[in-house]
Image: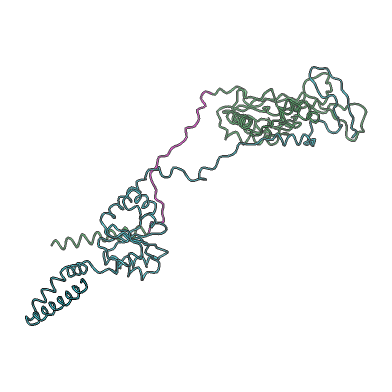
Amino acid sequence: MFSIIKAAVGGLTALCRVNGHQQGLLHGHLKVLAAGLNTRDIPPDHSDVVLPDRRKLKFVNKMPNFKNAKKEMKNLKDIQGPATAANAFTKGEFAIVAMGGGYLHWGHIEMIRLTINRKMDPKTTFARWRVNGPYKPVTRKGLGMRMGGGKGAIDQYVTPVRYGRFIVEVGGKVELGEIQRIMTEVAQKLPFKAKVFSRASLAAFQKKHADMEQNNQNPWTFKEITLGNMLGIRKVLSPKDLCHNGRFAGKFHLPWRV
Amino acid sequence: MAATLCRILLPKQGWLPFTQCVRHGSKSVTRHKRPLHFLKQKLMSVTRYIPPPRPAPPGAYPRQTIRDQEDDPFTILVKKNLKNVFQESKMIAVVQNSGSTADEMMLLKYKLHKHGITVKFFPNQVVRSFLKDSTYSNMAPLFIGHTVLFISKEPKVKEMLSSLRTSRHMLLLGACIDNTLLSAQGVVSYSKLPSVAVVQGELVSGLTLLTSQTAAMLQRHPAQLSALLQQHVKQQSSEGAPKAQEAT
């Protein structure tokens, strides 16, 4: 009797083993699903952000209200060098920052205004101008005119923009990812190089430059040589090179210079 | 473009060089990048930014503190196994395996299993670190390359050698038999040694040679014994006479 039971048990185990083996053969190609913990990032809390009443960009006039408009000299030094005004964040979180010098005329300003006003969501975002409307008169002579006969008539008004100046500042209950696409679209159409920054990325950008200055292995610096006028090099440099230390060439900023 | 040298008189407050070469080309702010004066080009290249030297990437150089590393649990397990192996077995042979196939391996294992020899695989690094701490430290040079261990409780050297002779890829490097380290030739000569019983018998027979001979002589026929003894006396006397003559 015991032998029969043993045989039965042995047979059963053999059967199970065979089945398991077959199952293993059949399902060997499938992935093993393990139970895991789904962790998600906590979305940022924008409850403390206060949105202003007028959230869209205001309309900017083509020219200032002058009774007697005066012609001005070209005065190209308003493009040269870094910006000292409007080069920091005020109320917003993200901004388009100029990476070079140039003139913005009414067409550019309209483009910025229309694009941003159309694409942004006024319930959650607001935008602010950080440049003035065009105020600098630019003269032009008629087509095909010979030299001479006085200065040309005022053709248009422009706004000068220096390197590091904010053009538009955007804020509200938004993340960079939502707003970046719209702002880069605008930034690429500007007549100078421009980039979109957030508060953190701008701080990081400035820190990177400061670190570059710190860990420069070159014992010779532009500043040292120009201040001391070594080898009479100031003969071939302009007075602005003393201020800018070789980082600017005309209206262009040279990012590889320290 | 006319080059004009302008001598400009300036007040002494902020100084500029007295002579400035003024070429009436483009203005300082242009839409294109103005070509730099050669000296300014030189100045820009001399004062360029030189970044600090980059450190080597993390996996570039081997870690220096290899010896001071603690063993991971797997190594500890393997070392325990090794310890048991060395304690229990009398014969431990190290064989180099140069690309034997699974079938050959299977056949070899089958052949050896019939004589009670097991085939074991251990990682070389672990074995070397184990041997370093044990009494078998002189075996360490054997464990280089693809090695296999043949272990048995009884030193069955002849059978092992015969099975290794037939296999093409296995090469005997050395063995530790009865706590004595043997080279490959040593193992061969060990196999040619007679068995313990035979050696013992030879030793016993050598020791009891004289007594057995005398016992055999005494058991012979008494006439032969007396003849032998007479011959012996004659020889002794003949030896004694020449020795006395030599002495005088």
Question: What residue is at 44 percent from the left and 42 percent from the top?
Answer: B65
Q: Main secondary structure of the magenta part?
A: loop
Quarter of the image that includes the C terminus of chain B = bottom left
Residue B204 falls left or right of residue A243: left
B132 versus A48 height, above or below: below
B135 versus A223 height, above or below: below
Image quadrant assignment for residue A16: bottom left
Picture colour scheme: by chain
A91 versus B61 height, above or below: above
Q: Colour of chain A?
A: green
In this rendered view, identify the residue nearer to me: A39 or A209.
Answer: A209
A194 versus A19 height, above or below: above
Q: Residue furthest front?
A: B248
Image quadrant assignment for residue B35: top right
Residue A98 falls left or right of residue B146: right
In this rendered view, identify the residue nearer to me: A126 or B157.
Answer: B157
Quarter of the image that includes the N terminus of chain B = top right
Residue B214 falls left or right of residue A78: left
Percent coordinates x, y for residue A189 in the rendering: 70, 36
Q: Is residue A153 magenta?
A: no
Question: What residue is at 76 percent from the left and 31 percent from the top?
Answer: A250
Q: Which residues are magenta?
A: A26-48
Question: What residue is at 37 percent from the left and 45 percent from the top?
Answer: B72
Q: Residue furthest left?
A: B222
Question: Chain in cyan?
Answer: B
| Number of numbered callouts drawn | 0
Percent coordinates x, y for residue A37 in the rendering: 40, 40
